[in-house]
Image (cartoon, helix red, strand yellow):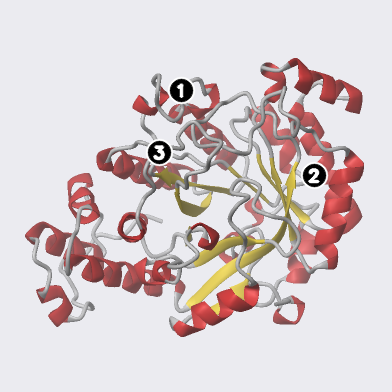
Amino acid sequence: MSMKSAPAFSPTLDESLLASVAAPSVRTTIERSMGSYELTREEALHALQATGTDVPALMFAASTLRDRGKGQTVTYSRKVFIPLTNLCRDKCGYCTFAKAPNHPDAKTMTPEEVLSVACAGREQGCKEALFSLGEKPEERYALARTHLRNLGYTATVSYLADMCELVFRETGLIPHANCGVLSRDELELLREHNGWMGIMLESTSHRLLERGQAHFGCVGKVPETRLETMATAGELGIAFTTGMLIGIGETLEERIDTLFAIKELHQRSGNIQEVIIQNFRVKPDIRMRDRSEPSVLDMVRTIAVARLILGPDMNIQAPPNLTPDAYQTYLYAGINDWGGISPVTKDHINPERSWPLVGELREVSAEAGFTLRERLCLYPEFLTQPAFVRPTLAPRMHALAAADGLVTEDLTRE
């Protein structure tokens, strides 16, 4: 994934646009990134602070770099979301998904409920089942332990593993678990019936763990622990998605550090197939309800810098439903994926934000010069690597994939 060193800058950026860049530091950053040099942290920080006419030049550089690796195709995944349990040992200041035990909506789904949602997804042409759930709630709450005991389990991860197998066996949907920090044994337990897995790094800032900050009281949000989970997954041949959440109190320097941590992790482990740049949105029932949200400008600068840091071959995603009036702009900033879109279930993490229709995504993408394609849970470059394809899931994945590794177009629905 790392960019190659190059002896000289080969100009591919429109010279008139490059000449409009006012800040010498930003111009240098653009020239170096377009010439396949690896940016330094200082250069990336300067780019993240671009203003005025420097911003479109930065975006153009990022989108040009994206085109080198990904062309003019933008992808999405058609999936169903299964919120297995909304109890969680962590209490993030921005989270509306996790419920306290005394909340009337606190719940752990039964196998019958899980299968009902999965079947509805299959009927609507979904290929993937995303299990979203709180992290190890039994370590904190008696109610979670009671839920598990009533289901015949003592650990959430064990129950999750069986539900992944059930969904795949009964519906053919490919499971994808997003369940927080995991040990090697837990990763091995989940590996056989998960096409890939996910954990948002969010931020490498230890400051956010302090009292009054977004991650105070969250034992699962220690950055090193999350990075260790992904590194161990790489040793086990498990592809992972990760990403950063911007606007939760991090500084620009900490944002850059997070992107470089992801880059360095992938250079070591080789299993990061996708990086999400997600913007914090205010909700009335969260601890951070009085915080300001990132602007569209903040998002496009962060996306563009992420592309320049992570290079042409990384898959970079930004959720369209979190910026419904401006998400087309993300294409110009360097993304190549829209993430999961569900025709059946809401976004359980941001329930107030409806998914765009696939037809709308197709139209918006086409207006920007892109072809929209449906992808599987594994991106094509990972689908061709046997180490990342579980033998149990391989026949199903290959049956759905066209020669280019994306979903066969006859199987795609609007």
**Residue 316, x across and y down, in percent:** 46, 59
**Residue 246, x across and y down, in percent:** 39, 45
Instruction: Give me the residue at 57% from left, 74% from top.
Output: 361
Left or right: residue 75 versus residue 195 is left
Q: Which residue is mark 3?
A: 248
**Residue 138, x across and y down, in percent:** 72, 20
Instruction: Please state which amino acid type lies under the numbered disc 2.
Output: Cys
Q: Quadrant of residue 146?
A: top right
Instruction: Give me the residue at 79% from left, 33% from top.
Output: 108
For residue 75, above or below residue 169: below
Left or right: residue 409 versus residue 284 is right
Instruction: Give me the residue at 92% from left, 43% from top.
Output: 112
Closer to the camera, 169 or 123? 123
Q: Which residue is mark 1?
A: 216
Instruction: Please state which amino acid type lies under the numbered disc 1.
Output: Phe
Return the disc, 3 or 2, that comes first in the chain's sequence: 2
SS at badge 1? loop
**Residue 264, x across and y down, in percent:** 38, 43
